[in-house]
Image (cartoon, helix red, strand yellow):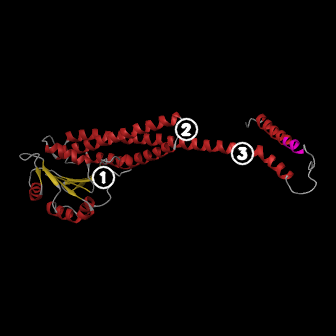
Amino acid sequence: MTALYGYALSAPRRGERLSGAALESACLSSDLAWAHLSAEPEDVADAQTWLARVLPELDPSTVQTLTGAGTRPRSVHVGQGAMILLRDVPDETIEDGGDMPSLRLYVDARMVISLSRRPVGALTVQSERIASGTGAVTTGAFLHDLVEIIAERIDATVDILTCATDTLEDALDDGRPTEDERQEATRLRRAVLGLRRHVSPQRDALEALRLLDLVPKGERRRLAELHDRHVRAVEELDLLIQRLVLAREGIAGSQAERLNRQLYILSIVSVLFLPLGFLTGLMGVNLGGIPGAGSPVAFWIFVGLLAGVFGGLGLILWRMRWL
């Protein structure tokens, strides 16, 4: 296996797309180059072989982390470079419950190697910039540009979730919540929690990233700005979680209130009709000696009695403010 694609980042071949042996040679040269590899399960063995040829100094644990399944955002110093694990917003939007694709990077002064198991939208934008000749020419600038793209995508997703939460709250304020609104609250809460689960450790990873020796002071200041954007994103996500919790509590309270009202009505009906049922049952037994059995007006007298009992119970309930 060779890398999926790559680019020369520094002169004289800046912005040139490379592949195959040319890309491998560029990574081994003194000129800065970027190579992207697939870390899908069927490609892991080939990716590890490629890394062993280009970076024989990497220890097995680092190679395993770069090609492994589960990765948590972090930045650590490795030999002459650094291993950086990030998460990007999926193109299908995290609102649909999709997980954030993992992006694994090894960087040093002469190369950038990225790996992913799923398409990463930020890498597509980064490659387009580099191909147009406006991309980074240093490792620090490459990292800044990539993290900036990810931050913009995270901010855009947070804005979408905020607008959706605003719409949900307005709908809940307008009247009785519907089943669709209940499902929307659940979907939004799942999306916000999924986003925060990765953005929070990524905030800490950026703090460690800007302190790495291979990042120049100028890029450190710019990375600090991106770290602050991640901090604000986490704060906004925490606020969204609280708002959605309140929305869910409001929906649950409305459902409980509606259920209690229905049970209350059933209770009132039972109080009114239970005595009537007792009297009609008692007078309907098929035994001798039933009062009024031979009278032609006994039925209407009994109906009047039932009406009186019904009215009396209704008056009592009204005086007790149950009606």
Cα gap from disc 2 to disc 3, whole angstroms: 23 Å
Cα gap from disc 1 to disc 3, whole angstroms: 55 Å
The circle drawn on residue 267 is 3
Q: Nearer the viewer, residue 153 or 28?
A: 153
Q: Nearer the viewer, residue 44 or 108?
A: 44
Q: Nearer the viewer, mark 1 or mark 2?
A: 2
Which quarter of the figure has residue 229? top left
Q: Does 97 sit left or right of 314 as displayed?
A: left
On the image, numbered disc 1 is attached to which residue?
Answer: 101
For the record, the magenta segment spans 298-303
Q: Is residue 215 depicted above or below 175 in this figure? A: below
State the image coordinates of residue 164 (x, y, percent, origin top left): 41, 39
Dot 1 or dot 2: first in sequence order is 1
Binning the other alpha carbons within 10 Å of mark 3 as few (below 14), some (14 to 19) or many (20 upward) gives few
Mark 2 residue type: Arg
Dot 1 or dot 3: first in sequence order is 1
SS class, disc 1: loop
| CB within 8 Å, label 1 to label 3 | no
Most extreme residue toward the left is: 12
Cα gap from disc 1 to disc 2, whole angstroms: 38 Å
Mark 1 residue type: Pro
Mark 3 residue type: Ser
Q: Is residue 204 depicted above or below 312 in this figure? A: below
The circle drawn on residue 176 is 2
- Residue 33 visible: no
